[in-house]
């Protein structure tokens, strides 16, 4: 039951990491009465905007839809090569005063995706021109005419890393097509549709072959090694005892791997049908919960490689029972093996998924499953022909050293994944990883077979308690900044004291764990932050991370304090400051702040 719960949780997490917002509906708030740019899409530092202007090209009068933004945001020129059919860039105009012709798009340029496919896109700054005339007028141009215009822009935008949710924006503007107000623009003749995006006729078969090879390559990824040899040996050993189940147990283990890729294919179908977007491999790594789980799993597996603890197979596989439970265990462990391939096989899976996503749903589903077939194939062969195991190198000290070496590789991969976190969370994840490794060591190495049951329980309860406490300190979402901290400046402090304003100085450092505890237990409390605001306290953050920082020098020479953390409160009418060390002073600080007079 536990394995199926884990499977359900993993699928839910992938869907949550990839679930896009629904296409943004046309909204009356998206007005542009002053012709100001309206933001269409944004992803991190990448963005794209659009605005409207009355324009003229040659003898044609109309409106120019002017796009501006960073070059990495691109729109698709053709429905066939867009991530999903019908999501090419579209522009539609309407008005009660004017009649419009078909939009004239500019020349597109070629974008080469991760599989070297050539795709026609628009990006950066470009202009789409829509011809128009006064409603009911036979003339193509009409002077001294003005009126409200509404332009709907829709489609899907992508960067090199991700495709954003489909969007639909409406721009509204008051357009005056008087001759003196028209902007002259020149349009380049648009190209014919590109024929290079789909490749040669054999490209689909070649891509499926490469997908199969990609699946094979996942078996040599270091993340998979901690479990696969153990699982295969146990499956073969179990099958040898049951005779007729030699092939069925092995194939069931392979089905567990295929189940993982079937979940991916199912998630892709759901996203395409119900949300109009695609499952991009790697989106789950943009979910911090999933990413944190993978980092900690890799750390735990590395500890296993170092021999701190052993991975114990479920009794359904390792035991002597020949009941149907063995099949469920084999499926669960095969699914786990496929999950473990994800951090190491990112580039391989991303390339294969990249090709699959520009295909229709049936082909995309087949391509995803072919990756799973490639990964499962060696184990299907190995468990069907147990005699092949006799050709493998015999176990010895070299294998133990090899396992320990893989442990270091897993730690390197974990650190690489940590680099994907925001800078503010990276160190916290690393700190907790060290604490987790200690707790695993404590759980496994501090007890033995002969340890008394009570002592064993106490040690393991302590290990869990330490891990939970560290998780609360390091992994809980950082609280929003409740206090408006000012950087340390001696002149600012002196001026505030001269004005009889209370001053709170928090001496801290990035390497100080107790300082982080003080931040959580004192300065993240809303009642403390409210009092600081209510009493008009000047809050100063004195960073002493480096020895030459002004706050570091002042801590020693001015405030005569040996180290951090220390918080100092100066109050009007009191010569001596109030000082708190450590991080267990929230109630004392609250009492001192409550005694201050409210600010005017």
Image (tube, grey):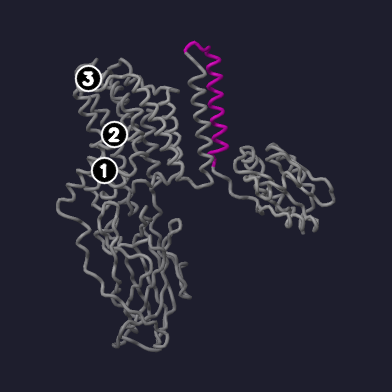
Q: Secondary structure at mark 1?
A: helix
Residue depicted at 23% across the width and 37% down the height: 374
In contact (CB < 8 Å): disc 3 and disc 2: no
Residue 391 image-quadrant placement: top left
Residue depicted at 23% across the width and 22% down the height: 389
What secondary structure is the stretch in magenta mostly built from? helix
Residue 563 image-quadrant placement: top right
Density class for disc 1 (Cα within 10 Å; few <14, some 14-19, many ≥20) is many
Say if 473 sits above or below 495 in the image.
above
The residue singled out by tag 2 in the image is 219
**Left or right of residue 477: residue 384:** left
The residue singled out by tag 3 in the image is 390
Give the mark nearer the N terminus: 3 vs 1. Answer: 1
Mark 3–mark 2 distance (CA, rounded to whole Å): 20 Å
Region rendered in magenta:
449-476
Residue 87 position, x and y percent, is 30, 60
Q: Is residue 189 magenta?
A: no
Q: Residue 368 bears which disc, if any?
A: 1
Mark 3–mark 1 distance (CA, rounded to whole Å): 33 Å
Mark 2–mark 1 distance (CA, rounded to whole Å): 16 Å
Residue 169 image-quadrant placement: bottom left
Q: Secondary structure at mark 2?
A: helix
């Amino acid at each position: 039951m536990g394995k199926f719960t884990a499977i359900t949780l993993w699928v839910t997490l992938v869907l949550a990491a990839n679930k896009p917002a629904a296409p943004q509906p046309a909204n009356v708030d998206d007005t542009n009465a002053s012709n100001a740019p309206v933001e269409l899409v944004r992803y991190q530092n990448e963005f794209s905007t659009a605005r409207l202007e009355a324009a003229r090209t040659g003898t044609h009068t109309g409106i120019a839809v002017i796009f501006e933004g960073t070059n990495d945001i691109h729109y698709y020129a053709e429905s066939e090569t867009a991530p999903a059919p019908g999501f090419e860039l579209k522009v539609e105009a309407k008005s009660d005063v004017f009649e419009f012709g078909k939009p004239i798009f500019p020349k597109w340029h070629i974008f080469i995706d991760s599989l070297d496919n050539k795709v026609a896109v628009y990006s950066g700054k470009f202009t789409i021109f829509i011809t128009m005339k006064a409603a009911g007028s036979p003339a193509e141009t009409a002077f001294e005419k003005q009126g409200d215009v509404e332009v709907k822009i829709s489609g899907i935008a992508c960067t090199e890393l991700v495709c954003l949710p489909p969007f639909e924006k409406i721009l509204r503007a008051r357009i005056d097509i008087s001759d003196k107000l028209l902007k002259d623009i020149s349009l380049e003749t648009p190209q014919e549709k590109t024929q290079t995006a789909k490749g040669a006729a054999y490209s689909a078969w070649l891509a499926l072959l490469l997908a199969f090879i990609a699946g094979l390559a996942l078996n040599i990824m270091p993340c998979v090694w901690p479990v696969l040899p153990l699982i295969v040996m146990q499956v073969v050993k179990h099958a040898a005892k049951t005779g007729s189940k030699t092939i069925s147990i092995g194939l069931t283990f392979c089905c567990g791997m295929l189940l993982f890729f079937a979940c991916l294919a199912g998630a892709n179908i759901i996203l395409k049908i119900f949300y109009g977007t695609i499952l991009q491999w790697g989106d789950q790594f943009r979910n911090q919960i999933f990413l944190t789980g993978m980092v900690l799993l890799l750390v735990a597996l590395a500890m296993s490689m170092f021999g701190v603890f052993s991975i114990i197979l479920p009794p359904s596989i390792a035991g002597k029972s020949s009941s149907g439970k063995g099949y469920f265990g084999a499926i669960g462990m095969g699914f786990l093996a496929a999950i473990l391939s994800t951090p190491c096989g990112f580039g391989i899976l991303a390339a294969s998924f990249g090709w699959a996503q520009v295909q229709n749903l049936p082909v995309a589903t087949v391509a995803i499953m072919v990756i799973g077939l490639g990964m499962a194939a060696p184990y299907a062969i190995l468990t069907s022909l147990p005699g092949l195991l006799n050709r493998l190198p015999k176990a010895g000290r070299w294998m133990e050293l090899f396992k320990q070496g893989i442990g270091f590789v897993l730690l390197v991969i974990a650190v690489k994944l940590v680099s994907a976190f925001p800078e503010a969370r990276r160190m916290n994840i690393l700190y907790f990883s060290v604490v987790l490794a200690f707790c695993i060591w404590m759980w496994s190495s501090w007890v033995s077979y002969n340890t008394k049951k009570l002592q064993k329980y106490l040690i393991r309860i302590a290990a869990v308690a330490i891990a939970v406490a560290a998780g609360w300190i390091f992994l809980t979402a950082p609280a929003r900044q409740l206090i408006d901290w000012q950087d340390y400046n001696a002149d600012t402090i002196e001026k505030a004291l001269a004005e009889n304003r209370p001053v709170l100085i928090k001496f801290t450092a990035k390497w100080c764990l107790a300082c982080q505890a003080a931040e959580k237990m004192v300065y993240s409390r809303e009642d403390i932050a409210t009092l600081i605001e209510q009493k008009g306290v000047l809050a100063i953050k004195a960073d002493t991370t480096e020895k030459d920082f002004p706050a570091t020098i002042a801590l020693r020479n001015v405030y005569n304090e040996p180290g951090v953390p220390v918080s100092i409160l100066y109050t009007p009418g009191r010569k001596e400051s109030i000082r708190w060390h450590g991080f267990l002073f929230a109630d004392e600080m609250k009492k001192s702040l409550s005694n201050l007079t409210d600010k005017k």
